[in-house]
Amino acid sequence: MILVWLIGLLMGGGLLALLLGRWNKNLPRWIALYTLSIAFIALLSFWIDHSQSAGISPPSSWIIDYQHEWIPSFGISFHLAIDGLSLLLLVLTSFLGILAVLCSWKEVTERVGFYHFNLLWILAGISGVFMAMDLFLFYFFWEVMLIPMYFLIGIWGSKNREYAAYKFFIFTQASGLLMLLAILGLYFIHGRSTGVYTFNYFELLGTVLSADTAFWLMMGFMIAFVVKLPIVPFHSWLPDAHSEAPTAGSLILAGLLLKTGAYGILRFVLPLFPEASLNLAPWAMGFGVIGIIYGAILAYAQTDLKRLVAYTSVSHMGFVILGIFAFNELALQGVVMQLVTHAISTGALFIMAGMLKERLHTREIDQMGGLWHQMPGMGAIALLLVMASLGLPGLGNFIAEFLILLGAFKANVWLAVLAATGLIFSAIYSLRIVQKVFFGPPEKVGPVPDFSWREMLIMATLTLSIIWLGVYPQPVINTVRPMINRLEQVFPARNPKHSPVLQAKPSIKDKYQVQKHTADDDT
């Protein structure tokens, strides 16, 4: 029941913030903060307990599985389940949610109740995406997280907020409809071949499909996920959404919404369409490399600080696609690390961009400069964050990109070499941020205050997290290893240790099967 309780807690907290916000502007802030703190503490405790139990006995692939009939006549169930990847991303969701509330504390002063309602419902939708094992339910949560984000950008954004909100919604909604068509296609094909019409993920695994049908169904899922990730050429909505969104909106976009795209590829595209995924792999890895280099070059060309950081996300997400379609353990471990470390380091840069705009009333880096003497605390943390972004050893991003490149080298040497050049470009744009903002010629902006206590708490938490992930990434790797091993077995040709010569190859459904629970089971 903990999975249902988590979604209910976030949605209930959002409704409470909306209702009480009519009488008191401060109550929604505290309601959102307490709600997310409870969720974070519960999930963190569960993760620690699971890690300790996994050290005693072999970790199970699926940790919790909850299923209850919803619309049985159409084969729709309320089916939630989590493995190590889901658990890790749920902890990240609540963690960044707390920081989103804190960084909005003084920035948002109008319609505070409705703002925190949207914030909590976005997080509820994201949490549902990470847990849904019924494809109809997955699509439902996919839509739940989009609409509140549209309002967040369109109401509390900057000058061109309406344009950015419309563009974000059209891109994500249109691609989501393609995924819905693919879900329905898979549903009817499976029903006609087996006589069982269901949206259950575990039942749909291993559905017999012709090569052409599998390709087109896979592309329906794939386009929805690469638009959200995003990958070139489906990325043009991202810079506008980031530059116009409020600080918390940029944090959630970079830290969480982009990660739902990568999660969807790992959870649905590869297991449901393994042969089609193998055929797509060279193209996907090629587009990943293009995204790495293209995003880095565009980042260097920007003068708007938030657009600059937005294009760095395009570059970093190229590493994610490259690692996913390398189909080996090292690359997949790097992908998971990249999802976590990018969320923290890039989210922190967006928060810092919001802090600078609040003080200087501009995001143009050409109008900044010489701020180190006035804001040494912010300068020091900014320097560490850009070092993380360029992949400095000892910080989490280095572990992620090193593992991805190592795994990609095993799959395709030349693409891995080209991707490695992206590290050079990332060093150039990262150092440009520090030079322009903190060490450039000083602008006449008057006295600028350094961190407040609230801001210091936010940035110190993010800084310590990125250092911890760089120094001791093993808990993250251990948590997702069962999922990665399960995914590896779907592609034995790329992983000799799982070859049928060494062991009998179980069906895809057997690899992903979980022990069924009813609504009354103790989960």
Image: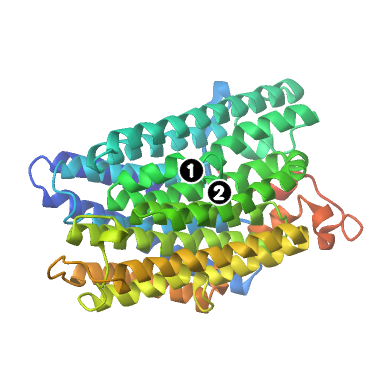
Q: Verify CB contact (< 8 Å) between mark 1 and mark 2.
A: yes
The residue shown at (46%, 76%) is 468
Inspect this view and state whether residue 245 appears: yes
What x and y, as percent, mark residue 7? 38, 45
Residue 391 lies, with reference to residue 131, above or below; the image says below
User: In the rendering, at what x and y percent does residue 438 appear?
Assistant: 30, 72
Question: Which amino acid, mark 2?
Answer: Tyr
- Residue drawn at x 24%, y 40% as measured from the top left: 159
Residue depicted at x 34% and y 37%: 164
On the picture, is 189 further left or further right than 44? Answer: right
Q: Which residue is mark 1?
A: 129
Classify 104 as above or below 225: below
**Mark 1 or 2: the one toward you:** 2
Q: CA distance from mark 1 to mark 2?
A: 9 Å
Nearer to us in this view, 493 or 316? 316
SS category of the residue bearing label 2: helix
**Residue for badge 2:** 263
Q: Is residue 289 toward the left or the right of residue 1 in the image?
A: right
